[in-house]
Image: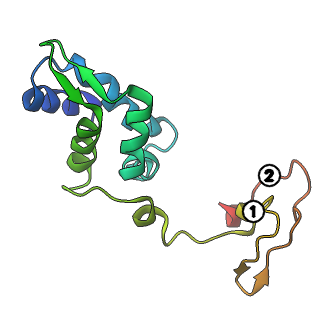
Amino acid sequence: MAHPWHHAVSSARRFGGAPEDYLGIHQWFDQTKAHLPDARHRALLHSSFGIFLCEQVHGPTLVNSMGRHVPVRVIGEQHVQEDMGGTIPTVQDWLGELPLRPWMAVGARGLRTRLEGETVPRRATRPKGAVLGADDE
């Protein structure tokens, strides 16, 4: 779905109440569009992790305008499934093939990881305040 409002309308049909009852939760899931305005924004919250995080932020249930207690986790599952073709990805699904870059391991004291044939040093390899280049993104 393209907009949190459409998710909220879907939630109101499914659980009762008004779309406004659910809009805050659906806006929470889609807040990452402000930082990455394409489908990749979903990698941050559209997962099983995001669903459980949503429950921590919004509480275990939402009381809709009809007085019905609706589990926040179920609302989150609905949002993710609507956007992800019926599935709920894990963090591993999203990030499992993400290449590990040296800047990601800076500060991970004692980490022994091999990247492209090089051992990641224990201390930072870039000067303090250095800006990441295109190869480090």
Q: Position of residue 94 (x, y in %)?
A: 43, 62
Q: Is residue 33 above or below residue 84?
A: above
* Quadrant for the N terminus in the image: top left
User: Residue sitting at 39 percent across and 43 percent down?
Assistant: 52
Task: Give amino acid for label 1.
Answer: Trp
Task: Give amino acid for label 2.
Answer: Val
Q: Is residue 27 above or below residue 122?
A: above
Give the mark nearer the N terminus: 1 vs 2: 1
Determine which residue is flagged by label 1.
103
Q: Position of residue 11 (x, y in %)?
A: 16, 31
Dot 1 alpha-carbon crowd within 10 angstroms: few under 14, some 14 to 19, many 20 or more: some
Q: Nearer the viewer, residue 72 or 41?
A: 72
For marks 1 and 2, give the one nearer the viewer: 1
Secondary structure, mark 1, is helix
* Quadrant for the C terminus in the image: bottom right
Give the Cα distance between marks 1 and 2. Answer: 11 Å
User: Residue sitting at 9 percent across and 32 percent down?
Assistant: 14
- Taking the image as shown, residue 98 lies to the left or right of residue 15, namely right
In the rendering, which numbered label is found on residue 131? 2
